[in-house]
């Protein structure tokens, strides 16, 4: 009985870890999918929103909508016409 | 609640020259903690927060990259003008503009105010850093300035919480109808227009005060030393040496304390739990992995202590000045220096900071070499191996050998970056033309102790939350891969050899044998791709499972016994060059809008790392 | 209202020189900024003007690099900028005579 509980706990921790790793390292689409699935999107509102790379390095890494992505093609910047 | 959120809130934008204190004001208005430092180009993206005025009005606040003019030359300025003109997809122009000016440098800042006025957006001018101006003897008649400009002017002190009271009052009472449209048309200024604006600025300054203050300042006197052709480089070398010495010398006792804490917790846990799968997960998986990473927190804090002080004092652009010849000779823009320096914290903000570089070729070259700057996540790996293989002894008059080796590793990364930049210069040719510098050298000021404290605490939070989330998750997964399937009955070797990770490690070891890596190292390299410091934790877990004893606090002596010196040096060489974490590659993809560059980057870094390790291993083996 | 200030450079017998030839510490006034007759890429002269290198503004060399004197740190008005040689080459100045300082 005790060992059954042990193994169950290990299984839960393992599944949670795999889920988190997929969420954090997987593609952005997957993350958005998970967020909508868990209806957590509103939780991110009100926080500062930027378009950083989420290295967890600047303290600003909040969950953010992908619409704030800044997409500037390399060739199209710094040109003054 | 949802209805309130969807109702359009007034949108205000903070606009101004670089380094005039926009982000400091943003932080106070919105209660956020965005990075603030004393150099131009800290903010390179649009940041949004919200402010609740005392009368209960909610306002959306935008922090924007600094701009010298409304005719953008660099990607970060482009972001600012796109937001101002309402050109961003799905976004209208701001309803109200707070034009932030540096009261000590109005002669330059007021031209942008005149341009913004021409744009026709309702605005207020924030006369920021008035405390510093007063200390310098600059007294500006704000009321007179307001009547000359025809817009309200408020005095602010961005570094003090009560320094923005006046600005908050203005935001509270000014009507800001939603304009929901684009900004009126903007005619780019001609050179003659700029000259006319400057005459107007001179006239205004003559009336309100603040003109004719170009005598020799404290910053000038300090610059005479810091930028001196001979003394300057010597001071720079001294500062860098001090940093790396301190990383080892000061960190000793807190590291010992953490080790002791982890070890006694492990002993207690081991005694309390019966032999089971859960005990294995907790002790061999989590504690061995997390414990070996946690030990390096003090060293990371010390490194950031120095980085934050250098950033806040205004020294960084001076370092860029001193090293500009080197940068120029390998075909890099002088503006590449600060993005590259940011990469010592993490390559991702460094790569984003390349938005301050105007020429696309220069920007790309800087992005490509940014991962070669040793990011702080690699510090645990270096520190582990140095701690295990380099004796603690004093060489050449007071220098700690371990600190010298660490310094050499950072230099190796920089030298590699310069070499790659040089190759890029030769291969992509002169297409970029001459590379620009035009870097502002801001006035020095004393680092703000409160900012320093907040900055360091943020580093502690970031590190601990990484340990508690992604590193923990990867440790659990690695433990599972290294535990299952269980060894067949009658197996002789350690159980891990029969597991999935064991088999994977055995295959990888074939690939890495020529550069001296054993199967344990080969396994640890894989999760290290997600986050560098995980490699240390992974070694902790892998050795805990193969050695069969508690290694959470004793990884250092264990690898000192089981690796040869050439293997250790080869692994150091690998970490100098090997591709960064996946998030870095994802950032490169985002910033260049193409898969091409992250793929080229990963390929060249792998090749460089393998070559570097191979040479290191062969040479060290031959010498040993 | 600006017409009276159209020529802020006081008449002087001192000849104008490229910014690079100004000795460190000496004060001068900007006479002209143009990227046209140098090898600088397009836009450099324009950006220098936007940074405040405009006719009539006071300049002073704060520091110079080790070899060939580049880069240079230039005080312009109340700000200081580091410039590479080709950027400084766009700027011509008229040294101020010592008695004016």
Image (spheres, coloured by chain):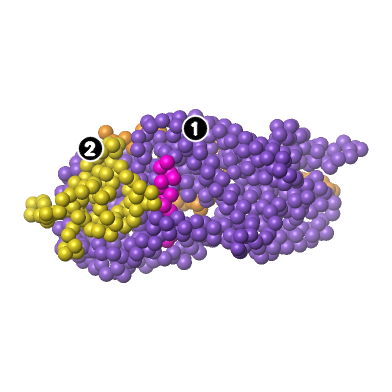
Q: Nearer the viewer, residue A47 or B555?
A: B555
Q: Position of residue B275 (x, y in %)?
A: 85, 51
> Which range of residues does the magenta coloring cover?
B311-329
Magenta-span inclusion, residue B30: no
Marks 1 and 2 in Cβ contact (< 8 Å): no
Where, by quadrant of the figure, is residue B261 drawn?
Answer: bottom right
Q: Residue at x 81, y 38 (%)?
A: B497
Q: Which chain is orange?
A: A
Question: Would residue B46 appear left or right of B95 to someone viewing this image?
Answer: right
Instruction: Count residues near mark 2 (Cα–Cα under 10 Å), then give few for <14, some for 14-19, many for 20+.
Output: few
With respect to residue B150, does B409 lie above or below?
A: above
Q: Position of residue C10 (x, y in %)?
A: 12, 56
Q: Chain of mark 2?
A: C
Residue A37 can be seen in this image: no
- Dot 2 corresponds to which residue? C36
Residue B570 can be seen in this image: yes
Q: Residue at x 11, y 52 (%)?
A: C7
């Amino acid at each position: 009985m005790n060992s059954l509980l042990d193994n169950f706990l290990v299984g839960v921790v393992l599944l949670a870890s795999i889920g988190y790793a997929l969420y954090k390292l997987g593609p952005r689409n997957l993350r958005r999918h998970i967020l909508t699935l868990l209806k957590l999107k509103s939780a991110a509102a009100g926080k500062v929103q930027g378009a950083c790379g989420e290295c967890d390095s600047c303290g600003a890494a909040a969950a953010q909508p992908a619409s704030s992505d800044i997409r500037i093609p390399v060739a199209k910047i710094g040109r003054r016409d | 609640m949802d209805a309130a959120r969807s109702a359009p809130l007034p949108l205000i934008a903070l606009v101004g020259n670089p380094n005039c204190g926009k982000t400091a004001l943003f932080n106070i208005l919105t209660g956020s903690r965005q990075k603030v430092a004393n150099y131009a180009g800290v903010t390179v993206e649009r940041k949004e927060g919200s402010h609740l005025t005392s009368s209960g009005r909610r306002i959306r606040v935008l922090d924007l990259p600094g701009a010298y003019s409304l005719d953008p030359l660099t990607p970060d300025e482009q972001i600012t003008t796109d937001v101002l003109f309402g050109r961003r997809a799905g976004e209208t122009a701001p309803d109200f503009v707070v034009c932030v000016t540096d009261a000590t440098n109005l002669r330059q800042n007021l031209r942008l105010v005149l341009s913004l006025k021409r744009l026709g957006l309702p605005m207020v001018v924030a006369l920021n850093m008035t405390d510093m101006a007063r200390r310098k003897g600059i007294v500006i008649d704000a009321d007179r300035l307001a009547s000359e400009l025809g817009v309200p002017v408020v005095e602010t002190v961005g570094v003090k919480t009560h320094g923005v009271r006046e600005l908050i009052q203005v935001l509270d009472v000014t009507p800001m109808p939603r304009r929901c449209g684009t900004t009126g048309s903007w005619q780019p200024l001609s050179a003659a227009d700029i000259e006319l604006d400057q005459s107007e600025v001179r006239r205004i300054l003559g009336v309100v005060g603040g003109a004719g203050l170009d005598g020799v300042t404290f910053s000038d006197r300090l610059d005479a030393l810091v930028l001196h052709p001979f003394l300057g480089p010597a001071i720079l070398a001294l500062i860098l040496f001090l940093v790396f010495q301190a990383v080892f010398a000061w960190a000793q006792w807190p590291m010992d304390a953490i080790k002791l804490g982890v070890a006694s917790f492990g002993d207690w846990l081991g005694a309390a739990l019966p032999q089971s799968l859960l005990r294995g997960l907790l002790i061999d998986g989590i504690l061995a992995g997390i414990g070996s990473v946690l030990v390096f927190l003090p060293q990371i804090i010390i490194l950031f202590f120095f980085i934050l002080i250098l950033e806040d004092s205004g020294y960084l652009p001076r370092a860029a000045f001193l090293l500009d010849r080197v940068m120029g000779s390998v075909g890099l823009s002088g503006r590449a220096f600060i993005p590259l320096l940011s990469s010592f914290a993490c390559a991702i903000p460094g790569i984003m900071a390349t938005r301050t570089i105007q020429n696309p070729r220069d920007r790309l070259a800087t992005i490509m070499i940014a991962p070669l700057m040793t990011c702080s996540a690699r510090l645990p790996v270096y520190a582990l191996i140095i701690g295990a293989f380099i004796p603690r002894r004093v060489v050449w008059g007071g220098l700690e050998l371990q600190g010298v080796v660490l310094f050499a590793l950072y230099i190796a990364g920089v030298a590699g970056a310069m070499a790659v930049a040089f190759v890029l210069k030769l291969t992509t040719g002169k297409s970029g033309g001459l590379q620009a510098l035009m870097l502002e050298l801001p006035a020095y000021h004393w680092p703000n102790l409160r900012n320093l404290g907040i900055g360091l605490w943020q580093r502690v939070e970031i590190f601990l939350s990484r340990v508690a989330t992604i590193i923990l998750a990867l440790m659990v997964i690695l433990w599972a891969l290294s535990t299952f399937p269980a060894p067949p009955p009658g197996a002789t070797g350690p159980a891990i050899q029969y597991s999935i990770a064991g088999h994977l490690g055995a295959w990888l070891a074939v690939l890495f044998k020529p550069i001296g890596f054993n199967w344990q190292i080969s396994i640890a390299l894989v999760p290290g791709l997600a986050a560098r410091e995980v490699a240390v934790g992974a070694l902790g877990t892998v050795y805990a499972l193969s050695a069969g004893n508690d290694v959470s606090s004793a990884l250092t002596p264990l690898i000192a016994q089981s690796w040869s010196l050439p293997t250790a040096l080869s692994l150091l060489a690998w970490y100098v060059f090997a591709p960064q974490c996946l998030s870095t590659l994802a950032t490169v993809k985002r910033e260049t809008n193409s898969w091409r560059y992250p793929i080229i980057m990963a390929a060249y870094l792998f090749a460089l790392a393998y070559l570097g390790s191979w040479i290191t291993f062969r040479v060290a083996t031959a010498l040993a | 209202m600006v017409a009276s200030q159209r020529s802020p450079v006081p008449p002087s017998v001192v000849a104008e020189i490229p910014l690079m030839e100004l000795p460190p510490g000496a004060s001068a006034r900007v006479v002209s900024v143009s990227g046209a007759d140098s090898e600088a890429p397009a836009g450099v002269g324009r950006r220098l003007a936007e940074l405040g290198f405009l006719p009539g503004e006071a300049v002073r060399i704060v520091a110079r690099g080790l070899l060939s004197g580049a880069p240079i740190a230039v005080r312009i008005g109340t700000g200081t900028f580091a410039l590479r040689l080709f950027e400084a080459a766009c700027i011509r100045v008229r040294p101020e005579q010592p008695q004016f300082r």
